[in-house]
Image (cartoon, rainbow, N blue to C red):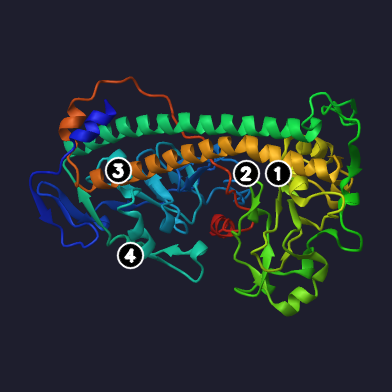
Amino acid sequence: MAESLLDELKPYPAMKDTGVPWLGEVPTGWEVRKLRSILRRVAKRNRPDLPLLSVVRERGVVFRDEMTEEENHNFIPNDLSNYKVVLPGQFAVNKMKAWQGSYGVSQYEGIVSPAYFVFDLAGVEGRFFHMAIRSRAYVPSFTQASDGVRIGQWDLSEPRMREIAFAIPSLPEQAAIVRFLDYVDRRIRRYIRAKQKLIKLLEEQKQAIIHRAVTRGLDPDVRLRPSGIQRLGDIPAHWARIAIRHLAAPGRSTLVNGPFGSDLLTTELTQSGVPVIYIRDISGGAYRRVSQAYVTERKAATLSFCRVKPGDVLVAKVGDPPGTAAIYPADQPEGIVTQDVIRIRPDTTRVIPEYLVTYLNSPAGRIALGPSVVESTRGRVSLPDFKAIPVLLPPIAEQLKILEAISGITNDILRLRAKTQREIDVLREYRTRLIADVVTGKLDVREAAARLPDEPEPEPLDEIEDDSDAEEAGGEDAAELTEETEA
C-alpha cells in the first residue's frame, strides 16, 4: 500500500515563486509567512512540580527521565522555579542546539531550561508545523540564524529566526499532509526496526563464534581443564591463564593510563600538534578519530609516559560496558591518551595485539573484566584492577590460527551486516527527502491521504537507538551544562 501511494505522487498542478531562494516554488494556494507572524514568545515559570522535559535533535521534545545518561549529562539545579513551562502544542527551542534541529512542538506539559525559547503558534496546525520545521528544508535556516565562537555552542538569534520564511497550506491540507506522512513514516520505521533487529542478531551470532574460539579454540577434541574463571568453564589444557599486566612489553610505562588533573588542562589543548585520544575515539573494536584535541610537541614531551604509537592497544576505562579495546592504526601519528584511556604496549612474543583486542572485546573478556567494574552512571575500571584481569592465552601460533578462523567465519556476517546497514541508511535518506518535499509543496499528497485506511491510534514505534557513537561526557555536552544553569 505504501509503495503504491509513493509511486502515484505527482507535483502540484500550479506553482508560484516564493522569492525565497532555498524554498523555491510552492503551490499557488499556499501562503508564505515569516516566523514572526506565527510564533508568540511565552515565558511562564514557577511550576517546579511539573516533569522535566528535554529538547533534542532526534526526537524533539521528550521527557528527560526517558533519556539515557549517554544522551543527557545536563546539570539540574535544586531550585527549578525559574524553569519555563511548556504546554502541549507549544514550540520549544534549545537555542544553543537549534543549528542542528534541536526543537519541536511539544506533546507534553512540563518544564525546560530557562535558557530555552518557548512559543505559542498562530495560524498553523501544531503537528504540521512540527513535521515541517524539523525537516531538512528548514533546519539550515536555523543554522544560519545561529552564531558563536564554537560550533558546539552556537546561539540562536531570535530576531534572525523570526525572519525565516515558512510555507503554509490550508488547514485541511495540513491535516492531509500529517495523515500521509504519519502513515508512510510508521511503515518506514517498522521496516528499519526489523532491519536493526537483524543486525542485532548478526552481532550476537558473531560474538558467540568469537567467544567459542577464544575459550575453546578450534579443536573440538582438545583436552580441557577448569579455567578458574566463574562463568567461563573449561579451557584447553595447554592454554595459560595470565594477568594482563604480564602481557605488556618489558620496561616501564608499557601499561598506563593518561594524566590526571593538573597534568593536562583543557587550556593546554590546541587545534593542531600531537593528538589527544579520548574514550570516544575507541568504538566498536576499532580506533576512529572523533576528537579534535591536540597538545604541542613541548607539552607532549612532558607526558611521554602515555605516548601512543601504532600497534599499541587502547582500552576505554569508562563505558557501558567499560573495557572496549582497539589497536592504534599504523596510519596514525603518535599521540597521548587521557586519564580514561589505558594504553598497552603488548609483548608480541607472548600475545598478538589483534588477539588481545579480540579477547577483550569478546563476551569472555567482558566476563573476565566483570568483577573489576565499579558501577556508577557508567561502568568504570581502575588501572590496578585492569592489570589483574585474567587473559586465557593459547600459544602464539594458535592465536594466529584462531584469528584467521574468526575472520573467515565472520566475514560473511559482516558483509550481510554492512548490506543491511546500507539499506537502513537509504531508507532514512529517502524518508528525510520525502518529508522535506511534501511539507514544502514539491509533492501533492492530497489524493493519496484521502485513500488511506482508518487506523487505530498507533503504539509508539521508535527505531532502536544506535549508541555506537556515544560521546564522552564533557565533550559537546559542555554546551548543555552551560545552558541548563543559565538564569
Residue 69, numbered circle: 2
Disc 4 from disc 1: Cα separation:
41 Å
Instruction: Give the secondary structure at mark 2.
Output: loop
Q: Earlier in the sequence, mark 4 or mark 1?
A: 4
* Circles 1 and 2: CB atoms closer than 8 Å: yes
Callout 4: helix, strand or loop? helix
Q: CA distance from mark 3 to mark 4?
A: 27 Å
Of circles 2 and 4, which is in front? 2
- Assess whether mark 1 and mark 3 are in contact (beta carbons under 8 angstroms): no
Which kind of residue does numbered mark 3 sit on? Ile
Residue under label 4: 159
Looking at the image, tell me whether mark 1 or mark 2 is earlier in sequence order.
Answer: 2
Which of the labelled discs sits on residue 378, or is there none? 1
199 over 23 or under it: above or below: above
**If the image is split into quadrants, where does the N terminus sit?**
top left
Element type at mark 3: helix
Q: Which quadrant of the view contains residue 340?
A: bottom right
Compute the Cα span from label 1 to label 2. 8 Å
Instruction: Determine whether 465 is above or below 457 in the image.
Output: below
User: Which residue occupies the foreground of this view, 33 or 413?
Assistant: 413
Give yes or no for contact between labels 4 and 1 (Cβ–Cβ under 8 Å). Answer: no
User: Badge 3 is on which residue?
Assistant: 435
- Dot placed on the residue nearer the N-terminal end, 2 or 4: 2
Q: CA distance from mark 2 to mark 4?
A: 34 Å
Instruction: Identify the residue at image location x=44%, y=51%.
Output: 102
Task: Determine crowd level at label 4: few under 14, some 14-19, many 20+ residues with C-alpha closer than 10 A.
Answer: few
Image location (x, y in percent) of residue 324 = 71, 46
Specify the amino acid type for callout 4. Answer: Pro
Residue drawn where x is 23% and y is 25% of the image: 452
